[in-house]
Image (spheres, helix red, strand yellow):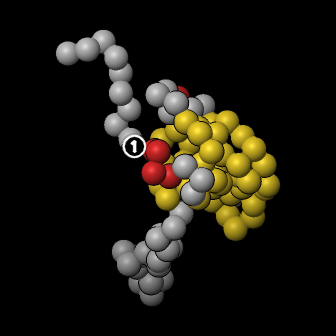
Amino acid sequence: MSGRKETVLDLAKFIDKGVQVKLTGGRQVTGTLKGYDQLLNLVLDEAVEFLRDSDDPQKATDQTRNLGLIVCRGTAVMLVSPTDGTDEIANPFVQPDGN
């Protein structure tokens, strides 16, 4: 076993493509992946942050904030997913308020 650490993710196929990144603390950012390293530090261009609801900090709203070129620190990255091929659907498990 070598002493070299390798990342489980193969992010090379997402270079210059849109990605969605979820960070610790509930922040959510989308942008174009420009670079990364073995520690999962990500460089995103044209980044947009989805602002959170003031009543429920874990819930993202439709409001956004343009960030431009940013670096996401690898220790804060929880999820990286492509934006192409993903759609938001209604939650099928939510019960109607009809008690």
Indicate whether 9 appears above or below 5: below
Query: Is residue 24 in view?
Result: no
Nearest the camera: 26 or 87? 87
Side of 59 where 55 appears, left or right: right
Side of 57 where 83 appears, left or right: left
Where is residue 53? Give x, y as percent: 69, 58
Where is residue 41? Give x, y as percent: 56, 32
Query: Is residue 72 in view?
Result: yes
Q: Helix, strand or loop at disc 1?
A: loop
Indicate whether 20 appears above or below 63: above
Quarter-wise, where is residue 71 in the image?
A: top right
Q: Residues within 10 Å of mark 1 (few under 14, many from 20)?
A: few
As drawn, the residue found furthest toward the bottom would be: 98
At a point 72% along the width and 40% down the height, the residue shown is 70
Nearest the camera: 16 or 46? 16
Give the quadrant of the N terminus.
top left
At a point 46% along the width and 44% down the height, the residue shown is 11
Quarter-wise, where is residue 96 in the image?
A: bottom left
Q: Amino acid at mark 1?
A: Asp
Residue ID for mark 1: 10
Indicate whether 96 appears above or below 6: below
